[in-house]
Image (cartoon, coloured by chain):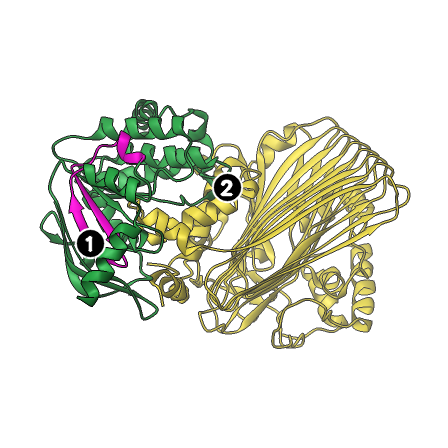
Chain colours: A green, B yellow
Amino acid sequence: MLKIENLHVEVEDKAILKGIDLEVKPGEVHAIMGPNGSGKSTLAQVLAGREDYEITKGSVAFGGEDLLDMAPEERAREGLFLAFQYPVEIPGVSNTYFLKAALNAVRKHRGEDEIDAVDFLKLAREKMKLVEMDEKLLGRPVNDGFSGGEKKRNEIFHMAVLDPKVAVLDETDSGLDIDALRIVSDGVNAMRNENRSFVVITHYQRLLDYIVPDVVHVLLDGRIVQTGGKELATELEEKGYSWLENDVAAAATA
Amino acid sequence: MSTSTETLERFANREYEFGFVTDIEQETIPPGLDENTVRLISAKKNEPEWMLEWRLKAFQVWKEMSEPTWAMVKYTPVDYQAITYYAAPKSDDDRPKSLDEVDPELLATYEKLGIPLREQEMLAGVAVDAVFDSVSVATTFKGKLAELGIIFCSMSEAIQEHPELVKQYLGSVVPRRDNFFAALNAAVFSDGSFVYIPKGVRCPMELSTYFRINAMNTGQFERTLIVADEGSYVSYLEGCTAPMRDENQLHAAVVELVALDDAQIKYSTVQNWYPGDKNGKGGIYNFVTKRGLCAGHRSKISWTQVETGSAITWKYPSCILKGDGSVGEFYSVALTNNHQQADTGTKMIHVGRDTSSTIVSKGISAGVGQNTYRGEVKILASAENARNFSQCDSMLLGDRCGAHTFPYIDVQSPTARMEHEATTSKIGEDQIFYCNSRGIETEDAVSMIVNGFCKEVFRELPMEFAVEAQKLLEVSLEGSVG
């Protein structure tokens, strides 16, 4: 579904990702963990197509196509979704209007008819229930005046409406209290199926108590230094990232 | 450079869709302005002596005045002797009695502009007066309005048919010596619309005037006067376009509104004069004086403007809140793209007690456009318990344009309550990327973000025009992104 090979990324001549290899098969949930500054969010942004990053080497295939060759909106229409760490506010544009425009762009790409306002509202109401989101947030401007938790729920709500093939969740747990974390996780879990894949980026292990991953990767200084099952997350929680940092340093000097 | 900056740079590619020229037989007078020109215009229009006198006084005043230089706009000086002050479709010699007699070429022009003059094709509920260069060519729905006692006709006709009303109100809100352009307009104005709503009548349809400059090197000097008698209500809309020409053309209009006790006037403008090409060549100089007088108690005047055209815009629709409890409103969207410059805003002069005013201004700059908000809120000592709320927001697209805000506040009453908010934002790459990442194209994203930014103003427009304004904004932004 998603295959990253030897991906090198620079920002302003500074190397951030230094050779990432990652393959996510349909239906799998991969967690990417790592300390601040390890390159986690860069990876998310690069996958979604943010232009500020220079890809110096490597490739990313998405459903067999060259992902890096697609514009950000094409990636979205092909079924890639990024849940933002900091969802952006768009004053004056209602959440409904925005999401309907987005869904219709996706549907048009799939060769489907545009959805009308009545059917859209029906769909939206159904999907909002997944994240126990207040219906009044539909009429409000996109993320404008939303609390941190509301913004994150709104991201998952957008994801549910757009029905992607691969969803990248960038620190969706940050800023969530324990109840919101559970609600958001339940929403994500409800969307898990054999065709849809997830890349869950997080700093903390606690999210992975709720969204249980198939594979855990540890990202340190732009490289995946460890890959394992869900127990790796628990081990990290106990020992901290320094445990692996020492390993890496040792490997580098060896 | 990131894609969104790059795409914003591509702003220059927009096209002006109303830039065609109508090939029609025109009657024009030679360029130049002296007393004889004023006499000639007055004679062409077969005006009574008092009107000629009024014009001549204005001309004397104008000769002694100099062009204002305080606005934040730069332009090649206007040669007032090189302008033609009167141009009319030739058939005007023998004015059309009905639309059937109007030159078909002219009707085709208005159809091209989307102004359905033929009543059977009219948008339900909109009566139109169309001014082509210097003369009003047709006013629709006149009969229906007359049944209610509403007068909606060209200014020329009003001078002939309703001299007492014209004499009473013309120049009562914008005096001839008010400013350089107002004086010029008073001397040479050619036509415009006149509206009178009698006591207690609520005008059942939108009244609309469409202005079109067609002839070359011609100035348009229209004059509009709207009087809403006690307890009446009217909603009025004006729209304007012009062909693409390399020369700059001058448009110096005067609009006066008078609202008596408990009357309400809602005046909406969608201004889309030719803005010049992407290098700043050509375009209309839009130097306009618009002012409303809330003469009566509890009267209300509301200005809504969407300014997307013109090379230079110099315009401050204002309200004098004389009646106790009167209300003034100003809602504005001004877009400057390429080399366009706009210096626009409002004045709210609070004279009566318990008067209140609201100002919401949204400036959008793109290309190398310069957008200035200039406003004054003046609360006189007599205006006890006056209130004002001002909000001035600017949005920048790209990094070569400019936004400026000059809010002047003069409060002479200790009981006044003032609120002022101002923001400047750069259309965020974050916002565009967020839209992209949900499948929305950059061009759609920009138009969505800009429309969202303008929402508070658009919702003040009559519905069908709000849709128009949104479309216009989209067209104006076309090519800016991609």
Q: Quadrant of the C terminus of chain A?
A: bottom left
* In the image, residue A218 lies in the stretch drawn in magenta: yes
Which residue in the rendered view is the most extreme toward the right? B381
Query: Image point 64% across, 28% down: which residue?
Result: B147
Q: Can you tell which mark lies on residue B465?
A: 2
Image label count: 2
User: Toward the viewer: B312 or B22?
Assistant: B312
Q: Can you tell which mark lies on residue B473?
A: none
What chain does mark 2 sit on? B
Query: Image point 67% across, 61% down: which residue?
Result: B44
Q: Say which of marks 2 and 1 sits in front.
A: 1
Quarter where residue B398 is shown: bottom left
| Residue type at the position of mark 2 | Phe
Disc 2 on helix, strand or loop? helix
x then y, percent, for residue A47:
24, 52
Q: Is residue B250 left or right of residue B444?
A: right
Q: Give the Cα distance between marks 2 and 1.
A: 60 Å
Identify residue for label 1. A225
Q: Quadrant of the N terminus of chain A?
A: top left
Q: Is residue B347 left or right of residue B270?
A: right
x then y, percent, for residue B464:
48, 38
Q: Mark 1 Cα within 10 Å, few/some/many (few <14, many 20+)?
A: some
Q: Is residue B443 above or below residue A125?
A: below
User: Toward the viewer: B90 or B366?
Assistant: B366
x then y, percent, for residue A144:
48, 39
Q: Is residue A202 above or below residue B83?
A: above
x then y, percent, for residue B259:
76, 38
Query: Image point 12% across, 32% down: which residue?
Result: A194
Magenta part of the chain: A206-230
Disc 1 on helix, strand or loop? strand
| Residue type at the position of mark 1 | Val
